[in-house]
């Protein structure tokens, strides 16, 4: 019994750690995307009519927005998969692994 409790606790902690890492990763991706969007806006405001610089600034902004939406899509897909498999609290915070398989 003691061994089972240790194994169950380790698996539960692993789920918490993975959930926290994924939440931190999505937060970091959102922060990077926001910074890139702001930098692209500043670059666009300071190009002074140079067509090449305008195109480069618009491209940077486009890629930042695209990256943000990809990250948001991944987050949403993980949440939907969690709901479909009965783990509606999959993100953020914790991933509750099913420890009933060990019994």
Image: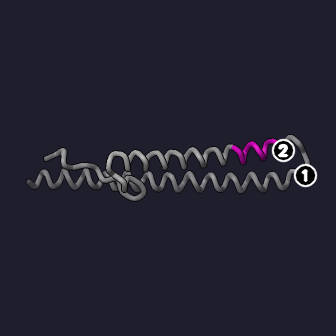
Does residue 17 appear in this view?
no
Judging from the image, the colouring scheme is: one colour
Q: Is residue 57 magenta?
A: yes
Marker disc for residue 56: none
- Whichever of labels 2 and 1 marks the residue nearer the N terminus, that label is 1
| Residue at (20, 52) in percent of width and height | 8
Q: Is residue 7 visible?
A: yes
Dot 1: few (<14), some (14–19), or many (≥20) neighbours within 10 Å?
Answer: few
The answer to which quarter of the image holds residue 58 is top right
Q: Residue furthest right?
A: 49
Q: Which residues are magenta?
A: 54-62
Is residue 56 magenta-colored?
Answer: yes
Total tally of numbered discs in the picture: 2
Q: Residue at x 25, y 49 (%)?
A: 98
Camera-side residue of 71 and 84: 84
Q: Name which residue lies at 85% across and 55% down.
A: 46
Tag shown at residue 53: 2
Residue shown at the point (37%, 52%) measured from the top left: 90
- Pick the residue in front: 64 or 90: 90
Is residue 101 toward the left or the right of residue 2 in the image? right
CA gap, disc 2 to disc 1?
9 Å
User: Residue 48: which numbered mark, if any?
Assistant: 1
Main SS, magenta region, reads helix
Q: Are marks 2 and 1 in contact (CB under 8 Å)?
A: yes
Residue lying at the far bottom of the rendered structure: 93
- Taking depth in this image into account, of 12 and 84 the one nearest to the observer is 84
Q: Is residue 13 left or right of 81 when viewed as pictured?
A: left
| Number of other residues with Cα within 10 Å of mark 2, as a class: few under 14, some 14 to 19, many 20 or more | some
């Amino acid at each position: 019994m003691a061994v089972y409790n240790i194994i169950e606790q380790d698996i539960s902690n692993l789920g918490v750690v993975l959930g926290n890492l994924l939440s931190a990763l999505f937060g970091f991706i959102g922060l990077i995307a926001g910074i890139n969007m702001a930098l692209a806006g500043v670059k666009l405001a300071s190009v002074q009519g140079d067509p090449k610089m305008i195109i480069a600034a618009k491209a940077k902004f486009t890629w930042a927005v695209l990256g943000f939406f990809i990250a948001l899509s991944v987050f949403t897909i993980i949440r939907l998969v969690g709901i479909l498999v009965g783990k509606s609290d999959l993100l953020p915070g914790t991933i509750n692994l099913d420890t009933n398989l060990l019994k």
